[in-house]
Image (cartoon, rainbow, N blue to C red):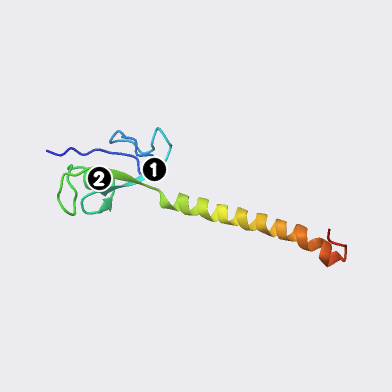
Amino acid sequence: MTFIRYTCGNCGKELNRSAEVCPYCHARLMAIRCTNCGFSGSKLDFMSDHCPKCGSIVTTQPVRNSKRITLLIVIAVIIVLLCLGSIALIFLLPSIAGLPVS
């Protein structure tokens, strides 16, 4: 018989079934994914210890909040663009002001 094992989708550590936040990496656990068919649902969907879509007793994995990841990527891109703009401005400002470039 295969037992359901809950692991964090972020750090991979094993979790308690009732966990809503990973105690190791603090990722918020939003849903549970069936590793057999890929169905993603809430804890209530998996209360019977079977996947509601395929019926398998499988290892399930909580899914991280993807909105947080998207937000972090957007912030990182903005920071990189601001840095590149600042560097370009440092090199272009002397030539715009008519100062000799060394």
Query: Disc 1 marks which amino acid?
Result: Asn
Q: Mark 1 points at which residue?
A: 10
Which residue lies most toward the front here? 102
Q: Quadrant of residue 85?
A: bottom right
Q: Quadrant of residue 44?
A: top left
At label 1, counting other C-alpha atoms closer than 10 Å, the crowd grade (few under 14, some 14-19, many 20 or more) is some
> Which residue is at 28% across, 38% downward?
6
Considering the numbered disc 1 on the image, is that residue within a helix, a strand or a loop?
loop
Indicate left or right for 40 with 89 as reference: left
Measured from the top left, where is residue 30 in percent x and y?
Answer: 36, 46
At label 2, counting other C-alpha atoms closer than 10 Å, the crowd grade (few under 14, some 14-19, many 20 or more) is few
Q: Name the residue under label 2.
A: 44
Indicate left or right for 17 with 86 as reference: left
Q: In which quarter of the image is residue 48?
A: top left
Q: Alpha carbon of mark 1 to alpha carbon of mark 2: how far?
A: 21 Å
Where is 98 relative to 28, above or below?
below
Q: Nearer the viewer, residue 80 or 67?
A: 80
Closer to the chain start, of discs 1 and 2, is 1
Q: What is the quadrant of the C terminus in the image?
A: bottom right
Measured from the top left, where is residue 75 in percent x and y?
Answer: 56, 53
